[in-house]
Image (cartoon, rainbow, N blue to C red):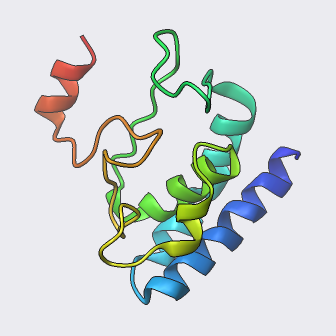
Amino acid sequence: MNTIEFSKQIRIESLKMVSRAKSSHIASAFSCADILAVLYNDIMKFNSKEPNFIDRDRFILSKGHAGVALYAALALKNFFSKEIKNMKKNSNLMAHISHKVRGVNFYRLSWSRFAFCCR
């Protein structure tokens, strides 16, 4: 899938998840879909079958309200599949970022914790 199509799919899946969950911040998700598409489709080095491999690139989303877009990008890159259809308030795919989701390393990261993690 090319980057433009990937960006569209991130928006579509984000909207589906937000609609099912009756929550979240869709404008925040839509506003970063293009960035996520370029990073996950063209730039970042990762392996969805082995998300913790040592030489992977790390992505830090400081805009926590856009977590649904990151979840959509990860699902479209096969980090997980079934869960994306089941986003609800009590699932791992909450409206905000959760480190319990496969492919997410950090969540609610303050700048002081960010500096420590990136040493």
Q: Residue furthest front?
A: 82
Image position of 41 (left or right of 112): right
Q: Position of residue 90 (x, y in %)?
A: 30, 74
Q: Is residue 88 above or below residue 91?
A: below
Image position of 54 (left or right of 40): left
Residue 69 occupies quadrant: bottom right
Q: Position of residue 49 (x, y in %)?
A: 61, 29
Q: Position of residue 66 (x, y in %)?
A: 44, 62
Image position of 115 (left or right of 41): left
Q: Is residue 17 above or below residue 63?
A: below
Residue 16 occupies quadrant: bottom right
The one nearer the camera, 66 or 88, is 88
Q: Is residue 12 above or below residue 22?
A: above
Q: Could you tell me which residue is drawn at 34 percent across and 55 percent down?
A: 97
Q: Position of residue 24 (x, y in %)?
A: 40, 78
Q: Could you tell me which residue is drawn at 58 percent across and 49 percent down?
A: 80
- Count numbered badges in the picture: 0
The one nearer the camera, 115 or 57, is 57
